Amino acid sequence: MITLSNTVDAFKTKREVERMKKALHGRDRLLFIVGVSFGLRISDLLTLKLGDLRGKTHLSIVEKKTANTRHSKRPRRIKISDTVAKEIAKLDGDDDDYLFQSRKGDNKPISRVQAYRILNAAAERAGLNVNVGCHSTRKTFGWQLYNNGIDITRIMEIFGHSTPAMTLKYIGITSDEIDEAYEAIEV
């Protein structure tokens, strides 16, 4: 669903993630899978090249937005999941080829606008009522970590946030979900 809002949502259920994957193919499916697996901003995702991932266990990347902050001295080290490794192994091409190559033949990656269009069109085809944007994959990554019991301070560090509250708001923890947590421990 195309949104005019300034906020976008995470895909919060396995069903939503699977429906998105089914609504995408080839390069566009890989964009979604890598996005929700790595939690990178779209500006960093789009610069990835095949050689950054092929045959490797980890991706090492200095994120553009945090390049001039406290995180600037150290690259972010990201474990490449088996799912991503299998998808990368299927690809032909040179190590210098962009992972999300534009089809214009100009040896450039797709644009941020194109990535937005791809994700929105897929959500529409999948019949999902979610405010979708390029950050939806990053937020989905954070939501998955949180939902699988990863400590909020570790997620906060991955995202480079300064407070746990910022991270909770970012991944879309709602007051209803907080109420559910309290109800789960009622004695």
Image: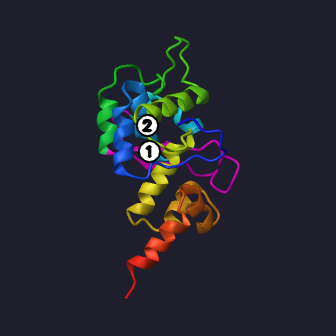
| Camera-side residue of 45 and 17 | 17
Provide the secondary structure element on which disc 1 rests. Answer: helix
Which residue is the extreme one toward the top? 105
Residue 137: percent from left, percent from top: 49, 43
- Is 65 magenta? The answer is yes
The stretch of residues the image draws in magenta is 54-81
Query: In the picture, residue 163 is in which quadrant?
Result: bottom right
Residue at position x 63%, y 41% in the image: 64
Position of residue 44 in the picture relative to residue 141 (left or right) = right
Residue with the mark numbered 2: 32
- For the stretch drawn in magenta, the main secondary structure is loop
Task: Tell me if mark 2 has few (under 14), some (14-19) or many (20+) residues whose alpha carbon lies within 10 angstroms of its own.
Answer: many
Q: Which mark is residue 24?
A: none
For residue 52, say whether it is visible: no
| Camera-side residue of 162 and 112 | 112
Position of residue 7 in the picture relative to residue 15 (left or right) = right
Residue 69: percent from left, percent from top: 69, 53
Residue at position x 49%, y 21% in the image: 101
Residue 83: percent from left, percent from top: 31, 41
For residue 2, say whether it is visible: yes
| Contact between labelled residues 2 and 1, with CB atoms less than 8 Å apart | yes
Residue at position x 50%, y 64% in the image: 154
Amino acid type at image mark 1: Val
Which residue is the extreme one toward the right? 68
| Camera-side residue of 147 and 127 | 127
Amino acid type at image mark 2: Phe
Task: Tell me if mark 1 has few (under 14), some (14-19) or many (20+) residues whose alpha carbon lies within 10 angstroms of its own.
Answer: many
Q: Which mark is residue 36?
A: 1
Residue 168: percent from left, percent from top: 56, 63
